[in-house]
Amino acid sequence: MKVLKFGGSSVANAENIQKVVEIVRQASADEACVVVLSAMQGTTDGLIEMGRAAERGDDGFIGKLTQIRDRHNTAIDLLFRNGNTSPISEFVESTLHELESITEGVRRVRELTPKTLDRILSFGEIASSRMVAAKLTAEGIENEWHDSRLLVRTDSNHGFAAVDFAETNKRLKEMIGKSKTLLRVLPGFIASDTGGYTTTLGRGGSDYTAAIFAAALDAEILEIWTDVSGMMTADPRFVRNVQQIPRINYREAMELSHFGAKVIYPPTIQPVMAKGIPVRIKNTFAPDDEGTLIEAESAPSSEMVRGITSIDEICVLSLEGSGMVGIPGFSKRLFDALSRAEINVILITQSSSEHSICVAIEEKYSELAKRVVDREFEYEINLGKIDPLKAESGFSILALVGDRMKEHTGVSGKMFSTLGHNGINIHAIAQGSSERNISAIINSKDVRKAVNTLHEEFFSDGRKQINLFVVGVGTVGSRLLEQLRQQHDYLLENMRLNVRVVGLANSKRLIVDEEGIDLSRWKDVLSGPSDSELKPAETAKVIAERNLRNSVFADITADAAVVEMYPTLLEKSVSVIACNKVAASSEYKKYSSLKDLAREYNSNFLFETNVGAGLPVINTLNDLMRSGDQVNLIEAVLSGTLNFVFNNYDGSRKFADVVRQAQDEGYTEPDPRLDLSGTDVARKILILAREAGHRLEMADIENVPFLPASCFEGSVEDFYAEMAEQEDHFRKLLDDAGSQGLKLKYIASLVDGKASVGLQSIGPGHNFANLSGKDNAVLFYTNRYADQPLVVKGAGAGADVTAAGVFADIIRAARS
Ligand code: ADP
Ligand code: ASP
Ligand code: MG
């Protein structure tokens, strides 16, 4: 004997019912079968809405009824196209008539009792099971339809009735004894009480009906046919790369379903477990898939965790107060009060100080819970011994389930650090002593992110998805996108990083695509039509709202307004990669507060490209400092632009023309005056000084300009014109140096915490004498590198190397 249960989606329409018929045909070919059916998908919800509408006195219930009628009639018409539809049509029609008059009664008395609602709901399962039975008959498959209400006996707790197993089992055995065929078809979910009134077993309860039958009839297997190929490591609607669980034991399956894996209704396992009957979850739409086998002891899997689930609409009750300490009975009274009000407690935590008890319940009971608990403790509350109950809604429970968790240390550590890294705040934690379940209460808005992050952490062979937002798509930004496109597969294969650009902004527009923007056509995407018109100024808000895991933000602008977004992002645990120098070179307070925020919220604030473009200058300095070295002197050529300009200015062309060439070749800041004034170099040495531990401001940096002040008046074009005018001045600088056999270099230095920048004439023996082109060089003289400095040298400007530096920071943030 086999019991097969088909869920709502399996009987959602004629096409699906046909699939069910084929499965039943095969299953019943050589074996006795009991087939249990749910209502057509959406019918139970529709019936509830209809009843509620009638209760409000709303005529709209007729519309709901019509929808239900149409769905059933359409399915019947399609299923029995070539045959006689009349018996089943007539049956459904007469049941609908009855339903209409009951609902009309509800509308008149404006009251929908749980008893009447159960009666209304029974329509769904009765109709679907009748339709399937009739279709089986029409296909020549002999079967008997039985009414579960005459078989399953319950108490009168309508909506969630408890089964009287002794009576039910007796009736089921009798039914089987009397039946003339080997295939019986029955409605799930519905039952009746001793008075003969219809009851229901709780939402999703058809699974339970099937399990009750399987246990009563000693079935060899219970098959739950649904729309997924088994139990998965997480809810497939939430997580894209879920894995199917081939085998699982009863306890784990129960824990998973209890904590939100809707694929099986939690009470289902109990009756079959008691008899050791295995359960198989199968997919009606892929019947050849193995599905999941739930059994007494499953082979251990290599995974530490079996599955990750969540339950929404949770209210957290906190009972606190100094009067609770050491006095026995407080928790008993709390739970008694909840239990008298029939409020189910899902999770409990109590701090060892006994100052507070925290309890999770379904959100719909929050007001009732507050009322009954405050009444219970009225005396103590009046005395000020305990506070009125705090009932907070909007929470979810997140649970990690698996028998093997107890054999592994560090599972909860990993769970909470992963959540912490993603800025997910944990409201309360509970771990059962069975160690089969670790639960955390988190804000509902974080659930999707939390489940995905944990799934990635525990099930993805170490693969990690990085959600990258890039702001600024000028020369450097475009190069970065190109590099990301080229390296995508390499990163995935070699570093297990799936870096996806999910947001892209230029100065006019922000485009977000959580599936990842196609980097081979990002320009079209950014200029093409879009459903939503997001503004770049909203970027931080949008990132916070999207709340994606492992989010990284790359600022490749030179815009001070973008910097204003950093605090919001860092506080949301979004890593900020700044190619933009404004933040790190702004007031010290701002720079250090951003670093503090990054530390506090487990995010990263990285700006390697602020100094020496792609050269590892800041990282080298950080490594020196972290290893306990002390930096005594930094001497550096930090302007690729100025180095290029002085290397190429030999008097054969005007100074202004050489500057123009530097700008055309992309070495300068968007405004070249920032380079020529020494401001850009000053910002860089300021950043290095700060990273070396000095609390400096921009104004502390000595900067002797080599350009006449007149060059800085007016626009960029005026600047070029004035430089051309001042050619004699530049020529003199060149000739003065040349006459002594020296070269001009723009040098920054940090000596004993004092920083300066300026033009210097250096001899052929100097460390910087052979720096060519746009190269940068940084010399670190430290305690360990005392005689010979540690030198970082190479191209210090250019879109490609800068983009590569940003790229490296992104990877650094991704791996942290
Ligand atoms: P039925 O109508 O067949 O009873 P349900 O909708 O009650 O089906 O349950 C199946 C659904 O359960 C799946 O479509 C899936 O979205 C959801 N689900 C939630 N968690 C899990 C999980 N861990 N594994 C499989 N499915 C899950
Ligand atoms: N039809 C009922 C419900 O939607 C029972 C079930 O489908 O299992 O809750
Ligand atoms: Mg279900």
Image (cartoon, grey):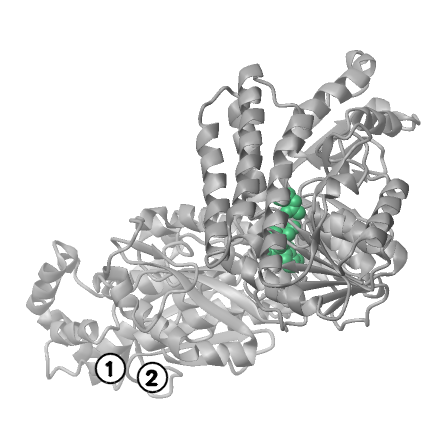
Q: How many marks?
A: 2
* Residue 93 showing in the rendered view: yes
- Name the spot of residue 61 as percent of width and height, x first: 48, 28
User: Which residue has dot 2 on it?
Assistant: 771
Q: Is residue 333 left or right of residue 490?
A: right
- Residue 159 falls in which quadrant of the image? top right
- Name the spot of residue 679 as percent of width and height, x first: 30, 60
- Mark 1: amino acid: Asn
Q: Earlier in the sequence, mark 1 or mark 2?
A: 1
Q: Which mark is residue 647?
A: 1
Camera-nearest residue between 48 and 423: 48
- Name the spot of residue 748 as percent of width and height, x first: 37, 68
Secondary structure beneath label 2: loop
Q: Is residue 804 above or below residue 558?
A: below
Q: Residue at x 86, y 63 (%)?
A: 296
Q: Is residue 100 left or right of residue 310?
A: left
- Please say if the residues under marks 1 and 2 sit with CB atoms less than 8 Å apart: yes
Secondary structure beneath label 1: helix
Q: Which mark is residue 62?
A: none
Q: Is residue 322 above or below residue 705?
A: above
